[in-house]
Image: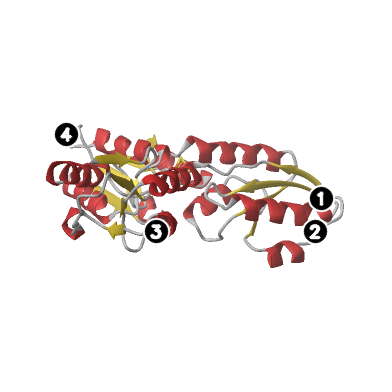
């Protein structure tokens, strides 16, 4: 029996880089380490870091009252004023903003300085979107739905620059951009969608189509893991959704030739390896 792990399983490049940076900091003894917001939506990782002395700063007020140590900025990125506050308070800044997100900050800063109004296609209130907003020299507008795009109006001569939240759905982005284009404004469009999620889903689907049994690992509240599960289930009837190895109750008939494994974006490697080793050794 073969056990195959989907190529893109678990952390994407940006999240892995951010988590690694925090662990790197913990190697310096006696250093006060903070992350601006939880580094990842995974309780186990946040708890493990907490045990190593890493403290989560929840908002700007808490940051304003912090005057010693190092602050790690997570992959979602933050607005410009957070960097300024870190500098003002003489804190060390470890910037783990994903380069794909940083690219959006740069576009937004430059184009807003050139006089373009910034339109962010994304979910208002999402930390990444909040961060992006904070790089625009003039108030940015967040558009999430067709209805909002249809209703958008501004001065006829106003120039626009449209960017997207990295995790936004490409088809929806295209549809919303089309609505803006029909309005006749002078528009620059930057497709800033990251394909990490799409790639993870495509690879899981391909593996599920070949596998006799599929195991999907991730938190029960993780929407991207649920989506992975649904996709795999559509191709492979015997698909299991587990959080950790403890949930796995596999009974494999002898006829099983291929077991596929994939994991959601915030599932640590350690859990993926445990599951993989268990299946390899026990079946
Ligand atoms: Fe991961 Fe892509 Fe987000 Fe970067 S932009 S953190 S690679 S999903």
Closer to the camera: disc 2 or disc 4? 2
Gap in angstroms between the C-alphas marked 1 and 3 = 48 Å
Gap in angstroms between the C-alphas marked 2 and 3 = 46 Å
Mark 4 residue's CB less than 8 Å from ligand 1? no
Give the SS element for disc 1.
loop
Residue occupied by mark 3: 233
Going by the image, does 271 lie left or right of 281?
A: right
Mark 1 residue's CB less than 8 Å from ligand 1? no
On screen, 94 above or below 161? above
Looking at the image, tell me whether mark 2 or mark 3 is earlier in sequence order. Answer: 2
Gap in angstroms between the C-alphas marked 4 and 1 = 53 Å
Residue occupied by mark 4: 29
On screen, 148 above or below 276? below
Q: Could you say which quadrant of the image residue 32 lies in? A: top left
Toward the viewer: 212 or 189?
212
Going by the image, does 79 lie left or right of 56?
A: right
Residue under the image location 63 percent in, 38 percent down: 107
Gap in angstroms between the C-alphas marked 2 and 1 = 7 Å
Looking at the image, tell me whether mark 3 or mark 4 is earlier in sequence order. Answer: 4
Looking at the image, tell me whether mark 1 or mark 3 is earlier in sequence order. Answer: 1
**Residue 191 visible in image:** yes
Residue 219 horizontal/vertical position (percent): 31, 58
Few, some or many C-alpha atoms within 10 Å of disc 1 (few <14, some 14-19, many ≥20)? Answer: few
| Image quadrant in which the N terminus is located | top left
Residue occupied by mark 1: 158
Going by the image, does 160 lie left or right of 107?
A: right
Label drawn at residue 154: 2
Closer to the camera: disc 2 or disc 3? 3
């Amino acid at each position: 029996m073969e056990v195959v792990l989907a190529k893109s399983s678990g952390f994407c490049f940006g999240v892995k880089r951010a988590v690694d940076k925090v662990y790197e900091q913990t190697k310096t003894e006696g250093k006060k380490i903070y992350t601006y917001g939880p580094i990842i939506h995974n309780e186990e990782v946040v708890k493990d870091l907490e045990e190593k002395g890493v403290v989560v700063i929840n908002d700007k007020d808490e940051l304003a009252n912090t005057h010693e140590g190092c602050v790690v900025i997570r992959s979602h990125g933050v607005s410009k004023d957070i960097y300024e506050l870190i500098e003002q308070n003489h804190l060390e800044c470890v910037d783990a903003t994903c380069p794909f997100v940083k690219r959006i900050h740069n576009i937004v800063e430059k184009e807003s300085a050139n006089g373009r109004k910034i339109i962010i296609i994304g979910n208002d209130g999402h930390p990444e979107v909040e961060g992006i907003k904070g790089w625009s020299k003039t108030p940015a507008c967040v558009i999430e739905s067709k209805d909002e795009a249809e209703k958008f109006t501004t001065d006829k001569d106003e120039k626009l620059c449209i960017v997207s939240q990295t995790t936004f759905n490409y088809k929806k982005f295209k549809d919303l951009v089309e609505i803006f284009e029909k309005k006749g404004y002078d528009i620059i469009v930057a497709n800033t969608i990251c394909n990490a999620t799409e790639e993870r889903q495509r690879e899981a689907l391909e593996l599920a189509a070949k596998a006799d049994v599929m195991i999907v690992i991730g938190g029960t509240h993780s929407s991207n893991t649920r989506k992975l599960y649904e996709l795999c289930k559509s191709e492979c009837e015997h698909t299991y959704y587990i959080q950790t190895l403890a949930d796995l109750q596999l009974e494999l008939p002898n006829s099983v030739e291929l077991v596929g494994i994939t994991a959601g974006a915030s599932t640590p490697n350690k859990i993926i390896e445990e599951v993989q080793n268990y299946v390899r050794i026990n079946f």
